[in-house]
Image: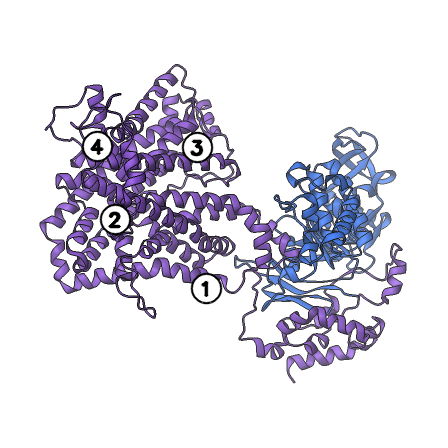
Chain colours: A blue, B purple
């Protein structure tokens, strides 16, 4: 079973820091990897190196035991048996929908009845059978997207690459397309690499999420895992809407923190600041400050909580987003099902925290 | 122990358990599977240095601990112990750099057959070779001859002869005067069309661009027929000056005026392109800031248009320096020589004996042109006002009741510089003899019958021009399509150099290029031993060289405006270079290639400057035929032929206009 292996992949375009630095990943067949990160983090460059449009300056890419690319030579994209959905869809305007979808087959020398059968199957999968003879210019954005997807699945590629495929679609279409991608992944069994800056998309679709920042790979984990146990401040800040608190905690011990531990840390911290001793952000000599990620859904009102001041309370549709200030001035986000008056001080419990 | 050995040993130590569990992805795999793999990856292996290398180089990972079958049955079930994707991990054991350098050693001297850019290996040498042959070789030959003439002293003396000096002075005076006229006319039309709400902008632009596309000798002829004592038009209207009074255009100011008319479209184009950078928002913001229309024009529009004005003025000046058709028709009868006509008359009277001299004069023209362009560069430095991401909306001053006034002015100018000369041309083609007024009694089509059916010279010229123009238009695509592909897919010093080398022959006055080709091909070709000089092929070679840039531009804009992912998608679909060229790229650039063919045809069919120097008996072109007919006093035949040429120009321009909506932006010079 062939795996896609990125081995210390580095790409330097010669402008200061490398676009991609030392990225190593192993993707098992059927993996659906979401490459997540802010724009300019190098995720598209990684994708283009996998496709063969860019050659790495260092490191290598393997598919199974095939060496696809390294700094010295690269197998051209046309020999990789990969497929890609481009952000612009890249449909050929001079061909009909069927011709677009069937082009990879035509290049492989398949024609006649076999061609029509495979193209028909691919088009019915994306529900575009009735549009086979139209030109791409006569289609809507979502339909073009589905043509691009059909073109990907018609040849059963080893690896399917998706470059922000939903970026140009409206919210409603995105949901529908996410389901299409999911079904496509289930059916094809291809390894898929999906580049996006939208974490909701990444979480919904992927078996694994890789977070990149400034060309470096920060963490790879399944969506639930990366949400619950992010590594480091950058990933913690990028994934979800958590707040990062600085609390005095012993270096050893559990990383998953319950309310008793948190209350003690908060209490001592707050007390420390309140008595006018050293300022709150100066660590005590014995216990250093640690970064603790707190998810807003883990913060709720409770009688055994500590008092926090409500700075703002904004209705977001399904619930209220509340901004809180701890006694020592640190900020915390919370969700609430009811409105809370701004400026009010109320006891809040932090049910769970994660030390970064 | 070397580093590679160490790694290999370390890996061997950790590997066995895993490769067992993987169920034979390595050497233990079934023979059938190995066979199929060998077939499939054969070429790759060859590229990477042999089959056994790939097999013995299995990357080790911790991720695949379950056999395939089990994974399949479990798919959809939570499998926490077996991640789909793992970060680096045990891959750290793999060498960072190829590591197998020793194994690749045998191939390290060979470049990969296909670079990752996807262009085939022959592309760069092909384009480079074509450019060297068409651009570098003739120009190097000319520069060599110029230098040796200078060193030899014999030619150096010539430069200080009074005749050369007078020609130099005349050239500078007429080119400068022409530039001023071009700036006045061009900026009037550019500001009116780009910034105001005058009606009929498209037809105004089209009509104003016509003088650029009409060959200069035809323009000159038309103006001569319009003015002067023998003008059929003036005679018909009863306005002709008495016979014997001088033709006012046979003078320095006449030449300057016509150069100005001929090159005003260049200023118009440059300024209009520059004004596209002044978006409506910028002008509206200035209005909101409290500036009246006049202040907006002075403070915003004029500074933004200045780069276009400078660029247009410089191009008009350089074109005036190299123009041959207008001073040839207007200057030679009056004994006024400019540098291009000096070359022509020297070559005509002394033949090959004068090569050194004409090389030197050509070098002088090239130097003045280069000087003009350098001044332009200096003036443009620091004036790059192109805005990024501005909205497409053009500014539009509502003129109110002044609109009618401006429209009247524009049409009056067009009537004077375009309609009246062309009418005069038509009129003199319809009169039976020079100096006869045109009326219902005298009108006759005999001139057309003469040139179309009786004169073998005009028929030969027509045939030659059509052959040269179609051969140049079609043949150039063979070079420009690969070149445009190469230039858009590559960047860096080499691509820039190729682009410059393609531009240079076009930027140089045609007369310089013609001299360069005479010098290069006067001697018999090496190996073949046949001389091109005096045949039609030397004209074709010169056309190839001078219209390379004309042919390249539309194709290049098509490639530039094409979404690169269209080609990338074809590559991932498995199409190699020639396959995707045929299936994807060529169909997409076809409209631009068509435009390129028509543009080159249009310019080449009317060309005079190059062919005037290179023609000999039997190889005359349309331009040469018109010039010779006029020179020999058959102005009615010259006019009739010119009318046909103008009709051809209008028809081809209209054809391009018709296809405009299928063309990439910036292909048609008279469109926005």
Q: Determine contact: label 3, label 2, CB under 8 Å.
A: no
Going from the N terminus, do you reach mark 4 or mark 2 first? 4
Residue B121 place in picture, x, y as percent: 52, 65
- Do circles 1 and 3 both sit on a common chain? yes
* SS for callout 1: helix
CA distance separating discs 1 and 3: 42 Å
Pointer 1: what residue? B125
CA distance separating discs 3 and 2: 43 Å
Farthest top residue? B401
Residue A172 place in picture, x, y as percent: 75, 36
Relative to A325, B351 lies left or right: left
Q: Residues within 10 Å of mark 2 (few under 14, many from 20)?
A: many
Pointer 2: what residue? B612
Q: Nearer the viewer, residue A152 or B426?
A: B426
Q: Which mark is residue B278?
A: 3
Going from the N terminus, do you reach mark 4 or mark 1 first? 1
Farthest front residue? B454
Q: Residues within 10 Å of mark 1 (few under 14, many from 20)?
A: few
Residue B71 place in picture, x, y as percent: 86, 62
Pointer 4: what residue? B224
């Amino acid at each position: 079973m062939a795996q896609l292996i990125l081995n210390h992949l580095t790409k330097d375009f010669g402008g200061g820091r490398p676009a991609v630095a030392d990225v190593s990943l192993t993707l098992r067949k059927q993996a659906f990897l979401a490459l997540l990160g802010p724009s300019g983090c190098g995720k598209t460059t990684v994708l283009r190196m996998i496709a063969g449009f860019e050659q790495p300056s260092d490191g290598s890419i393997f598919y199974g035991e095939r060496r696809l690319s390294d700094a010295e030579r690269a197998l051209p994209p046309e020999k990789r048996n990969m497929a890609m959905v481009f952000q612009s869809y890249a449909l050929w305007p001079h061909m009909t929908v069927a011709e677009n979808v069937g082009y990879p087959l035509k290049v492989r020398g398949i024609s006649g009845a076999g061609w029509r059968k495979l193209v028909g199957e691919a088009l019915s999968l994306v529900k575009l059978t009735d549009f086979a003879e139209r030109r791409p210019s006569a289609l809507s954005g979502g339909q073009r997207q589905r043509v691009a997807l059909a073109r990907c699945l018609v040849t059963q590629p080893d690896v399917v690459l998706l470059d922000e495929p939903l970026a140009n679609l409206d919210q409603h279409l995105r949901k529908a397309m996410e389901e299409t991608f999911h079904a496509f992944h289930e059916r094809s069994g291809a390894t898929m690499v999906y580049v996006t800056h939208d974490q909701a998309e990444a979480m919904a679709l992927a078996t694994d999420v890789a977070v990149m920042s400034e060309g470096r790979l920060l963490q790879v984990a399944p969506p639930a895992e990366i949400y619950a146990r992010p590594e480091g401040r950058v990933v913690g800040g990028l994934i979800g809407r958590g707040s990062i608190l600085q609390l005095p905690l012993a270096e050893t011990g559990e990383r998953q923190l319950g309310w008793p531990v948190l209350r003690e840390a908060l209490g001592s911290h707050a007390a420390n600041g309140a008595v006018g001793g050293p300022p709150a952000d100066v660590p005590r000599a014995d216990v250093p400050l640690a970064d603790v990620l707190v998810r807003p859904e883990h913060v709720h009102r409770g009688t055994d909580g500590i008092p926090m001041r409500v700075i703002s309370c904004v209705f977001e549709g399904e619930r209220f987003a509340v901004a809180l200030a701890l006694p020592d001035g640190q900020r915390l986000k919370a969700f609430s099902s009811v409105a809370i008056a701004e400026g009010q001080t109320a006891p809040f419990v932090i049910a769970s925290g994660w030390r970064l | 122990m070397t580093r590679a050995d160490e790694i290999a040993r370390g890996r061997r130590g950790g590997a066995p358990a895993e490769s067992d569990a993987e169920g034979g992805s390595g050497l233990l795999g079934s023979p059938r599977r190995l066979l199929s793999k060998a077939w499939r990856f054969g070429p790759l292996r060859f590229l990477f240095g042999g089959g056994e290398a790939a097999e013995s180089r299995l990357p080790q990972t911790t991720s695949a601990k379950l056999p395939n079958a089990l994974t399949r049955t479990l798919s959809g079930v939570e499998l926490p112990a077996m991640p789909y994707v793992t970060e680096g991990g045990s891959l750290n054991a793999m060498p960072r750099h190829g590591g197998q350098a020793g194994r690749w050693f045998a191939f390290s001297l060979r470049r990969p057959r296909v670079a990752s850019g996807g262009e085939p290996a022959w592309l760069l040498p092909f384009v480079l070779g074509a450019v060297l042959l068409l651009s570098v070789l003739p120009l190097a030959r000319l520069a060599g001859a110029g230098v040796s003439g200078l060193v030899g002293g014999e030619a150096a003396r010539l430069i200080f002869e009074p005749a050369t000096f007078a020609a130099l002075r005349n050239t500078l005076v007429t080119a400068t005067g022409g530039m001023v006229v071009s700036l006045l006319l061009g900026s009037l039309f550019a500001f009116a069309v780009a910034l105001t709400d005058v009606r009929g902008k498209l037809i105004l632009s089209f009509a104003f661009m016509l003088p650029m596309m009409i060959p200069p000798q035809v323009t000159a002829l038309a103006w001569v027929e319009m003015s002067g004592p023998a003008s059929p038009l003036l005679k018909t209207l009863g306005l002709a000056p008495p016979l014997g009074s001088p033709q006012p255009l046979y003078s320095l100011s006449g030449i300057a005026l016509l150069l100005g008319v001929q090159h005003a479209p260049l200023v118009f184009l440059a300024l209009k392109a520059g004004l596209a950078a002044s978006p409506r928002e910028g002008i509206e913001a200035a209005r909101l800031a409290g500036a009246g229309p006049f202040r907006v024009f002075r403070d915003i529009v004029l500074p933004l248009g200045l780069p276009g004005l400078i660029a247009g003025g410089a191009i008009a000046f350089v074109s005036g320096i190299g123009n041959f058709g207008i001073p040839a028709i207007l200057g030679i009868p009056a004994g006024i020589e400019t540098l291009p006509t000096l070359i022509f008359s020297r070559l005509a009277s002394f033949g090959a004996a004068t090569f050194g001299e004409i090389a030197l004069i050509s070098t002088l023209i090239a130097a003045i042109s280069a000087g003009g362009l350098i001044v332009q560069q200096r003036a443009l430095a620091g004036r790059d006002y192109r805005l990024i991401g501005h909205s497409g909306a053009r500014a539009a001053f509502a003129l109110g009741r002044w609109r009618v006034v401006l429209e009247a002015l524009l049409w009056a100018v067009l009537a004077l510089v375009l309609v009246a000369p062309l009418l005069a041309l038509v009129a003199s083609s319809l009169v039976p003899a020079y100096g006869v007024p045109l009326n219902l009694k005298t009108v006759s089509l005999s001139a057309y019958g003469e040139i179309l059916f009786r004169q073998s010279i005009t028929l030969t010229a027509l045939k030659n021009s059509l052959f040269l123009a179609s051969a140049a238009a079609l043949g150039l695509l063979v070079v420009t399509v690969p070149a445009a592909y190469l230039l858009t897919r590559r960047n860096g010093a080499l691509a820039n150099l190729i682009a410059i080398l393609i531009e240079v022959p076009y930027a140089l006055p045609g007369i310089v290029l013609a001299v360069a080709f005479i010098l290069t091909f006067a001697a018999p070709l090496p190996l073949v031993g046949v001389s091109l000089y005096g045949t039609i092929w030397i004209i074709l070679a010169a056309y190839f060289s001078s219209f390379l840039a004309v042919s390249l531009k539309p194709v290049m804009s098509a490639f530039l405006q094409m979404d690169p992912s269209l080609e990338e998608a074809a590559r991932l679909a498995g199409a190699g270079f020639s396959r995707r060229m045929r299936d994807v790229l060529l169909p997409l650039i076809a409209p631009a290639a068509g435009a390129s063919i028509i543009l080159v045809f249009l310019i080449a069919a009317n060309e005079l400057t190059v062919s005037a120097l290179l023609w000999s008996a039997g190889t005359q072109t349309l331009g040469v035929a018109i010039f010779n007919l006029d020179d020999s006093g058959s102005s009615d035949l010259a006019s009739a032929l010119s009318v046909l040429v103008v009709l051809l120009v209008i028809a081809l321009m209209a054809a391009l206009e018709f296809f405009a909506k299928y063309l990439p932006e910036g292909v048609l010079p008279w469109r926005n």
